[in-house]
Image (tube, rainbow, N blue to C red):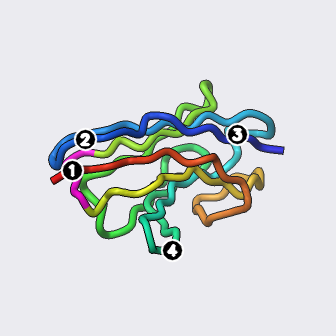
Amino acid sequence: QVQLVESGGGLVQAGGSLRLSCTASGGSFSLYAMGWLRQAPGKERSFVAGINYSGRNTYYTDSVQGRFTISRDNAKRTVYLQMNSLKPEDTAVYYCNTDGVAGFTNTYSPGNYWGQGTQVTVSS
C-alpha cells in the first residue's frame, strides 16, 4: 500500500512561484513512475506532469511546458513540482499520483494512488 502526502500549496500572485512536494510511504517508491494532476473548480482532473522511476524522463501538458518542472529524490521518497511564472488559470487543487506498479519503465500513466491534494491559488 502506498500513501502520498502533498505539501507546498498556497496563495501567490501571478508571475510568482511555488514548489509542491509529495512524500510517499510504503511500497517501492524508487521504482514507481509519479505524476501531478490538478482539478480546477467545475472541471475534471487533468494531467500536469509525470516522471519515470529514475527521473530521467519527464512529461508535461502543453500549458505548463517551460514553466513547471517535475523532479524526484528517491532517497527522500519525494517528488516535486516547481511552478514558475504562475498564471490565474493554474489555480486548482494539485494531486500527487502513482499506479504503484514497480518497474523500470520510461513512461508515466495515472494510477489508483492519490494524495489528499494541495490548493494552489494564483491571484491576478
In this picture, residue 31 sits left or right of residue 88: right
Which of marks 4 and 3 precedes in the sequence? Answer: 3
Q: Are marks 2 and 3 in contact (CB under 8 Å)?
A: no
Q: Are marks 2 and 4 in contact (CB under 8 Å)?
A: no
Q: Are marks 1 and 2 in contact (CB under 8 Å)?
A: yes
Towards the viewer: 11 or 75: 11
Q: Amino acid at mark 2?
A: Val
Q: Is residue 52 above or below residue 62?
A: above
- Disc number lying in front (3 or 4): 4
Q: Which residue matches tag 2?
A: 12
Q: Amino acid at mark 1?
A: Ser
For the residue labelled by badge 2, is the local secondary structure a helix, a strand or a loop? Answer: strand
Which of marks 1 and 3 precedes in the sequence? Answer: 3
Residue ID at (25%, 40%): 17
Q: Which residues are magenta?
A: 84-88
Q: CA distance from mark 1 to mark 4?
A: 21 Å
For the residue labelled by badge 1, is the local secondary structure a helix, a strand or a loop? Answer: strand
How crowded is the residue under tag 4: few (<14 C-alpha within 10 Å), some, or many (20+)?
A: few
Q: Position of residue 124 (x, y in %)?
A: 15, 54
Q: Which residue matches tag 3?
A: 29
Q: Amino acid at mark 3?
A: Phe
Q: Amino acid at mark 4?
A: Glu
How crowded is the residue under tag 3: few (<14 C-alpha within 10 Å), some, or many (20+)?
A: many
Q: Which residue matches tag 1?
A: 123
Residue ID at (61%, 34%): 23
Q: CA distance from mark 2 to mark 3?
A: 30 Å
Residue ID at (50%, 35%): 7
Q: Position of residue 31 (x, y in %)?
A: 70, 45
Q: Is residue 88 above or below residue 6?
A: below
Q: CA distance from mark 1 to mark 2?
A: 6 Å
Any mark on residue 44, and which? 4
